[in-house]
Image (cartoon, coloured by chain):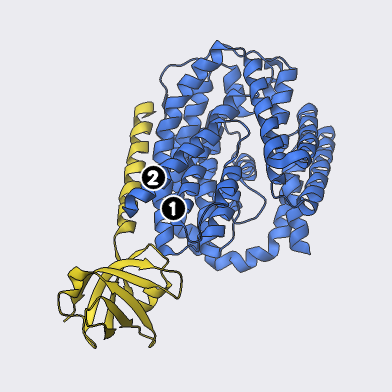
């Protein structure tokens, strides 16, 4: 029997399912660098890429894309201090995409070396 | 932070949808278009707000449509199913049945999505070619479903009048708000004027707790969801045609089951409209247009939209149950015609402010046609010709 209470409980369950789905959607997604370039502003992404050029301080980095193009990333001091931001090293970088399509800049908060 | 922003957008959408659902004459399309002007490109939060608003509206708009504009008890048989329950003192039960339909319509629509997606992808190029024929058939079916030659004739007149108004207004006007004025006239102001003319008084309403048998509710919700899936593939036809399909193909459906079907159709149409946008890039509703204008829908965005639909559905069902009893108590304390008069004034003012003098002209023409349909005792779905004929003409050009 579908009483008012059962319908209310079903509604609450539906809202909770939606909430969990939204939380899942907001988890950082692993993407290739090419995909990251197409990602819109404000999205959190995690990319795997080769460092092609890095400033001495390590805070501005160009990651090389699969197709040969490059994406500029701004690396936080925390990440820069790890000593892994050097040309030809392969890293994973997690952060927020800033800028529009095709001109994306990754504001990387966390960068880790990849074996 | 992003999760909180998304949740705030969903909550705002729910609030706006509850407001637009309860306020007679205010449509989500209007709010979506007005707010869309301020949205940035690729603004997912705006899309989440619009989607939540659409879902919330589809749950709440049963309350004014059942409680307002009921005809006199003498015209009991020509009344809409919700009004029939109101005239029997069972308005609260009618609203609860609709809400149950909305809830299970949402769940069943999501369950049907895998089949729906593969069907759409496989058949869309074929369906595109037969759209004018399907639309024409839907009009003819509406006319020929009327009982008796006299009613068939009046239905054809209503189709011709509505179609002409649609063809003249939707092609020659450019403000983009004419749809709002037309929908308000055909289905809002005409209903209320007809009710005012008859000096309807509603009887004391029963407010005891309800319990419904599970299987009939699920079956009716499934019927509603399937019919919505079918009509969502075509432009210009929507919930009214989905309800018509169910009525045609299920022999002698009771008023109570039909209300569940209407609830399921209302929310399932919203769910499928956003999926059609995602799958084939076609916007079948005003709110889908608003989303398409700001966002390219990818997999991740669609996931967020699904989440927003579920959250909004859950919260709106709870809101509808909370509001309905209070609205009904409030309605019984004041004279019914006064409530209807206030709703009528609100609709006319809104059309004037949103659409200007041209909108008022269209409101007048569409209200007169809606009243003609009500006076002749023919279904007002015939008035949908105002949208169907311009769409057929667009596809034939």
Subunit of label 2: B
The answer, for residue B223, to whether it is visible in the render is no
Q: Quadrant of residue A84?
A: bottom left
Q: Which residue is mark 1?
A: B45
In this view, the residue in front, B247 or B125, is B125
Residue B29 locus on image (x, y percent): 60, 45
Subunit of label 1: B
Q: Colour of chain B?
A: blue
Quadrant holding the C terminus of chain B: bottom right
Against B294, is B195 above or below? above
SS assignment at label 2: helix
Q: How many marks?
A: 2
SS assignment at label 1: helix
Q: Which chain is yellow?
A: A
In this view, the residue in front, B250 or A10, is A10
User: Taking B356 as reference, is A42 left or right?
Assistant: left
User: Taking B152 as reference, is B325 left or right?
Assistant: left
Against B85, is A18 above or below? below
Q: Which residue is mark 2?
A: B8
In this view, the residue in front, B382 or A68, is A68
In this view, the residue in front, B382 or B316, is B316
Q: Quadrant of residue B2?
A: bottom left
Give the CA distance from mark 1 to mark 2.
9 Å
Q: Are marks 1 and 2 in contact (CB under 8 Å)?
A: yes
Question: Are labels 1 and 2 on one chain?
Answer: yes
* Residue at image coords 51%, 40%: B264
User: Taking B249 as reference, is B318 left or right?
Assistant: left
Q: Earlier in the sequence, mark 1 or mark 2?
A: 2
Residue B243 locus on image (x, y percent): 61, 41
Residue B317 locus on image (x, y percent): 43, 34
* Residue at image coords 52%, 38%: B57
The answer, for residue B295, to whether it is visible in the render is yes
């Amino acid at each position: 029997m579908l009483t008012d209470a059962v319908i209310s409980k079903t509604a609450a369950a539906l809202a909770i399912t939606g909430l969990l789905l939204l939380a899942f959607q907001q988890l950082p997604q692993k993407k290739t660098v090419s995909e990251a370039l197409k990602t819109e502003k404000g999205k959190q992404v995690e990319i795997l890429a080769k460092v092609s050029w890095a400033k001495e301080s390590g805070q501005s980095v160009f990651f090389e894309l699969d197709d040969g193009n490059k994406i500029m990333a701004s690396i936080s001091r925390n990440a820069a201090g790890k000593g892994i931001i050097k040309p030809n090293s392969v890293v994973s970088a997690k952060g927020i995409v800033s800028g529009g399509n095709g001109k994306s800049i990754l504001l990387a908060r966390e960068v880790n070396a990849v074996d | 932070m992003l999760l909180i922003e998304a949740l705030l957008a969903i909550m705002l959408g729910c609030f706006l949808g509850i407001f637009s659902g309860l306020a007679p004459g205010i449509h989500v399309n209007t709010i979506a278009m007005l707010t869309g002007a301020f949205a940035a490109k690729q603004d997912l939060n705006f899309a989440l707000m619009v989607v939540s608003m659409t879902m919330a509206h589809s749950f709440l708009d049963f309350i004014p449509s059942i409680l307002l504009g009921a005809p006199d008890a003498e015209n009991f048989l020509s009344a809409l199913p919700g009004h029939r329950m109101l005239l029997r003192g069972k308005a609260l039960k009618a609203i609860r049945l609709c809400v149950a339909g909305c809830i299970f319509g949402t769940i069943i629509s999501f369950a049907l999505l895998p089949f729906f997606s593969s069907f759409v992808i496989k058949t869309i190029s074929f369906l595109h070619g037969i759209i004018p024929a399907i639309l024409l058939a839907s009009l003819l079916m509406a006319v020929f479903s009327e009982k008796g030659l006299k009613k068939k004739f009046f239905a054809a007149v209503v189709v011709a009048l509505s179609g002409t108004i649609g063809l003249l207004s939707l092609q020659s006007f450019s403000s983009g708000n004419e749809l709002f004025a037309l929908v308000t006239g055909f289905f809002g102001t005409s209903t209320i004027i007809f009710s005012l003319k008859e000096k309807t008084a509603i009887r004391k309403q029963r407010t005891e707790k309800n319990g419904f048998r599970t299987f009939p509710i699920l079956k009716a919700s499934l019927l509603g969801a399937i019919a919505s899936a079918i009509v969502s593939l075509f432009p210009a036809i929507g919930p009214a045609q989905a309800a018509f399909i169910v009525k045609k193909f299920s022999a002698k459906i009771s008023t109570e089951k039909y209300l569940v079907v209407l609830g399921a159709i209302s929310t399932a149409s919203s769910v499928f409209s956003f999926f059609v946008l995602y799958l084939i890039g076609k916007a079948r509703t005003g709110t889908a247009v608003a989303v398409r204008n700001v966002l390219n829908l990818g997999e991740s965005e669609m996931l967020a939209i699904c989440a927003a639909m579920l959250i909004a559905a859950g919260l709106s069902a709870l809101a509808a149950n909370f509001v309905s009893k209070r609205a009904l108590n409030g309605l019984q304390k004041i004279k019914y015609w006064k409530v209807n008069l206030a709703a009528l004034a609100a609709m006319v003012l809104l059309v004037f402010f949103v659409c200007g003098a041209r909108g008022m002209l269209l409101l007048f023409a569409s209200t007169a046609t809606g009243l003609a349909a009500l006076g002749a005792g023919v279904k007002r779905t015939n008035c949908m010709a105002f949208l169907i004929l311009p769409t057929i003409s667009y596809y034939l050009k």
